[in-house]
Image (spheres, rainbow, N blue to C red):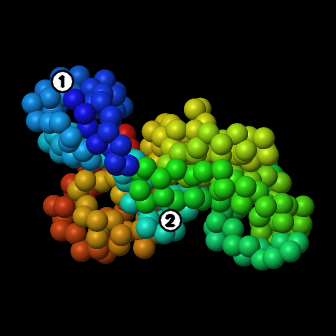
Amino acid sequence: MKIVKHSGSVVDFNRDKLKSSLLKSGANRLVIDDILQVIDNQIYEGISTKKIYKLAFNLLKKSSNSIAARYNLRSAIQMLGPAGFFFEKFISRLFISEGYVSKTNLFLQGKCVTHEVDIIIKKNNYIEMIECKFHPRSESNSDVKVPMYILSRFNDLKDRNYPIFSKSDKISSCWITTNNRFTSDALAFANCSGLKLLSWDYPTNFSLRKIIDEKQLYPITCLTTLTIAEKDKLMVLDIILAREIIDKLEILEKIDLSPIRIKNVIREASELCKYL
């Protein structure tokens, strides 16, 4: 059976890959077997991966909102756009969960020109900059031009004194983060140049997917009980993570949710973040 990817390329339908993604959502095997049977009966030659994903998501949602939310993780991260401003806030919170202090959107004068830096982090008196490369489409990857460009910015900024966390701080290293993936050339250049990379699945022991699942850092955009407009309102109010609404009824009241819907949203967020 041939299916069509987001990029337009045609590949064989991989049932095992779909099963693996369903298992990672936390669904039990009986639910997964039922979903796979339905999909087996409904797919056809030339169906898009988007339609398969949507079908699986809707079937999961009938079983559990929180499991469907976890299955929706990668798409939810892409909803932190379109410009990536909320993605930067999300990455900042991710590093804060790792024991860093963080500041976002700073303008720093380099040796040659002024730079807008997405995030500056500090841990054990070691200061690093983070540049975020956000892609609104799942098939877009960060190629070698990204680390080449960011390396030149880092070189212009490093070893100079800045009033960031104290009166005189120096940026010692640089991260590049993306919601998608890096090409092999981008990985090779960054590793050769001493740049640190963070993407959906890289590095293996500290990827976005791994950190989010391990620390329940699910973005608010995961939740299935909120509309897109309501998620946008919450992000404008600086609510980026699903767990940030737990025990904050006033935030949900502020966006005009009814008591019944507030209860449903809190339940989903709690189950998603394993608070119950």
Measured as percent of width and height from the top left, residue 40 is found at 14, 29
Residue under the image location 65 percent in, 46 percent down = 186
Q: Is residue 206 visible?
A: no
* Camera-nearest residue between 171 and 14: 14
Query: In the image, is 124 to the left or to the right of 6?
Result: right
Q: Is residue 19 above or below residue 87?
A: above
Which corner quadrant holds the N terminus?
A: top left
Q: Position of residue 230 (x, y in %)?
A: 29, 69
- Element carrying mark 1: helix
Which residue is tagged 2? 84
Return the residue at label 1: 33
Q: Amino acid at mark 1?
A: Asp
Amino acid on which disc 2 is placed: Gly
Question: Measured from the top left, where is residue 132 in percent x and y?
Answer: 60, 59
Q: How many marks?
A: 2
Pick whichever of labels 1 and 2 is earlier in the sequence. 1
**Circle 2 SS class:** loop
In the picture shown, does residue 80 fall above or below 205?
below
Quadrant of image for the C terminus: top left
Percent from the top left, x then y, of residue 183? Answer: 58, 44
Q: Quarter-wise, where is residue 240 in the image?
A: bottom left
For label 1, the crowd category at 10 Å Cα-Cα, with few meaning under 14, some 14 to 19 and many 20 or more, is: few
